[in-house]
Image (cartoon, rainbow, N blue to C red):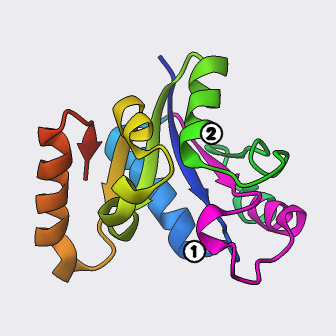
Amino acid sequence: MIKVGIMGGTFDPIHIGHLILAMEAINYKNLDEVWFIPTGNPNFKQDKNVTDKQKRFEMVKIATQDNKKFNVCDYEINKNGVTYSWETMKYLRENYDYDFYFIMGEDSLMSVETWENAEDFLKNTKILACIRRQEEMSKLDIKIDDLKSKGYFVEK
């Protein structure tokens, strides 16, 4: 089965850290591809000034165009209203017969249980968590153990 990593986010702007993280996930989990999915109307940034979604989508396309393992998906920027990761992952599962892995940093993993419809997201999504700061490693390990004890699939 094709293994696809999902990099969701505002990407305002996309930067080298996003691209490195995607390549690390490809190498770590032997992923066939990573799909970048820019958020259309990000839930957690309703009170922030965010660059137009079409411009962010174009920035991501330009930043990823030279890597044949990177793809850009326009699902969220084409949606009306606020976009949620659980809805996106549900859409992907229903429309593609791929093995999906949602890639996130430890900061996102620490708050994932506060996300919209978190239980559905966590029950139905394989998560690859990446450490951004070495000093956060023990906190990340504790959080991963906690989520695994609840039956969720989380790796670092």
Residue at 35% in and 54% down: 113
Q: Position of residue 94 (x, y in %)?
A: 62, 19
Residue at 69% in and 72% down: 46
Magenta stretch encompasses residue 55: yes
Q: Which residue is tagged 1?
A: 16
Residue 133's tag is: none
Magenta stretch encompasses residue 135: no
Mark in the foreground, 1 or 2: 2
Residue 110 shown left or right of residue 34 in the figure:
left
Q: Which residues are magenta?
A: 32-60
Q: Which residue is tagged 2?
A: 88
The quarter of the picture where residue 40 lies is bottom right
Q: Amino acid at mark 2?
A: Thr
Residue nearest the observer in this picture, 22 or 148: 148
Q: Position of residue 124 (x, y in %)?
A: 41, 29
Residue nearest the observer in this picture, 122 or 81: 81
Residue 128 shown left or right of residue 149 in the figure:
right
Q: Position of residue 75 (x, y in %)?
A: 76, 41
Q: How many callouts does the rendering have?
A: 2
Q: Position of residue 90 (x, y in %)?
A: 57, 29
Residue at 46% in and 45% down: 102
Badge 1 element: helix
The quarter of the picture where residue 44 lies is bottom right
Residues at circles 1 and 2 in contact by the CB criterion of under 8 Å: no
The quarter of the picture where residue 109 lies is bottom left
Residue 69 shown left or right of residue 40 in the figure:
left
Label 1 or label 2, whichever comes before in sequence order: 1
Q: How far apart in space, not on screen, are marks 1 and 2 (Cα)?
A: 24 Å
Q: Residues within 10 Å of mark 1 (few under 14, many from 20)?
A: few
